[in-house]
Amino acid sequence: MEKELTFRAILVGSILAVIITMYSAFAGLKIGGVYWPITTASIMALGILTALKNTNKNEINIAQTIASAGGLLAAGIIFTVPALFLIGFEISITEITLISLVGGITGVIFSVPLRKQMIEKEKLEYADGKAAAAIILAGDEKGEKIKVLGAMFGIGIIFSFLRDYLKTIPSFWNIDLIKTQFNKLFSFGSSVSLIPFSGGYLIGPKFTGIWFLGAIISYFVLIPFVVANNLFGDKLTASIELTKPLGIGLVIGAAIMYFLLKGIPALKNIFSDWKNSFEKNNKWIGLMLIVLTATITIITEMNLILAVIAILGAFVMAYVGGRVTGEMNVDPMELFAMIVLIGAKIVFGFNAVFLVIIAAVVCISAGIAGDTLQDLKTGFILGTKPKNQFIAQLIGVVIGALVIGFVLIALQQSYGFGGTDLPAPQAVALSAIISAETLSQNLLIGILIGGILALIVSFFESAIIIVALGIGMYVPIELSAPLFAGGLLRLYADKKKWTEKGRLIAAGLIAGEGFTGVVLSLLGLGKLI
């Protein structure tokens, strides 16, 4: 019988989980998204364990299961917790760690029992889970994949080190746009980074194209119009008062419509799916949920009602996130968190810190649920024991939780959130919702437009693309432009059938630059220190 949950699989997976958590946090704050890390983790685990010899497909799968959990846990934190810093609150490393553990463990608990229904019975796609299984089964003849990934990882490290520590590469360059009637209105600095280009490649031309369209509408249509007609004064005021709330409103409206269209239909089977799954394990699962609820109550000093809301929100959104991931290979975890947050704010009016905690727990739970089911799909194909993967996923959650607090605080001190370096678009949107006593007229208009557009688009495409349009309207155009360029490069690569090699190159560059950016911050050597 093949060995699966071995000491070296745990060790390799844990080391990779640290790396993936670190670079996912940096890259996610940079480009507003974290691509599924499971395929990258599979290649890394495959290469390392193959080099150590006497390995097998299930041992490799256990290592990648541990490793990939860190990426989604990091995403759940960076999409939410930076909102506190943006509105002037502080949160400790210990609190971030404990919130991560609560969200991550609930995500695993709520998703593992869904394996039989979603993977065995319904046979949902879980595309990246299938891709990871294919990578592991195919092996890595002559180590070509790990060589490419390793080389690009090294280039990313060197690039980031030269730019941020040795200062031999400028952090920004200035671009004067084409001389038009708006030439006095537009001049922007573009962050010299490999991550937006590489991220745009991984995301693809459709999503990045819609994102860039939002930037074009904002910077070349709305702002010039209002400035020319002296409606808001200068372009900075126009951005703050008009395009930013409109864009955030679009995201919120599209999120609500997306949930109505995809989330609620998914919920109709929620209790029937879980009834049989929980029957055998209801005692320990119930005990674990009580412990988690008590934990979140004590560590955050929130009231019991709020803790229950956070756990219930995690329960519901983990299910929805897991199912939507299986159907679409997309887990809009931050949107689910935003919906729960808005509901809690309207109904209960909790303070900002409690609202962000709710959002973080829900976001992490939804993300980890999607990742867990991707991993379980891989295990189903390879024949890995579900119990071993369950343990591996929990190990990955713990490793990620122990790392992410240090990472987030270091990045906040070195770069700050919401600027050109780390735009953190999801956290910016959350901070706008939380800090607003009353919703502005432009925000309400954006919500209405976002909902309508999402409904219209849903007839021939996923409503989630309207979220990209909204993000493009309020993040800096210097992020949108290279992201779109990366999307166009992906379009060209697809035509030339270079897609998979391009994925390795892009993933390696992101990992190298993101990892180094975090390390320099942790060492106090970040460029703003």
Image (cartoon, grey):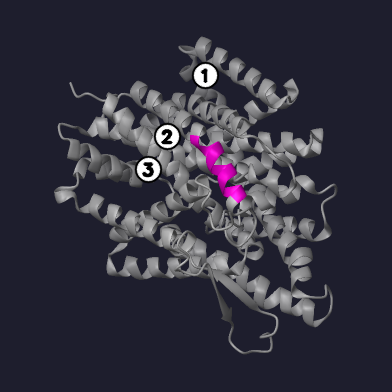
Q: Mark 3 — residue?
A: 38
Q: Amino acid at mark 2?
A: Leu
Question: Left or right: where does residue 432 sit relative to residue 70?
Answer: right
Q: Nearer the viewer, residue 469 or 521?
A: 521
Asked if the residue under mark 3 is in contact with the one under mark 2, i.e. CB atoms within 8 Å, the reply is: no
Residue shown at the point (63%, 31%) measured from the top left: 95
Q: Residues within 10 Å of mark 3 (few under 14, many from 20)?
A: many
Between the residue at mark 1 and the residue at mark 2, the CA separation in whole angstroms equals 18 Å
The local secondary structure at tag 1 comes to helix
Q: Residues within 10 Å of mark 1 (few under 14, many from 20)?
A: few
Q: Amino acid at mark 1?
A: Lys
What secondary structure characterizes most of the magenta part?
helix
Q: Which mark is residue 275?
A: 1
- Nearest to N terminus: mark 2 or mark 3: 3
Q: Is residue 186 magenta?
A: no
User: Vertically, is 163 above or below 359?
Assistant: below
User: Vertically, is 319 above or below 158?
Assistant: above
Q: Mark 2 — residue?
A: 373
Question: Left or right: where does residue 371 sit relative to residue 9?
Answer: right
- Nearest to N terminus: mark 1 or mark 2: 1
Q: Amino acid at mark 3?
A: Ile
The range drawn in magenta is: 403-413
Residue shown at the point (34%, 46%) measured from the top left: 39
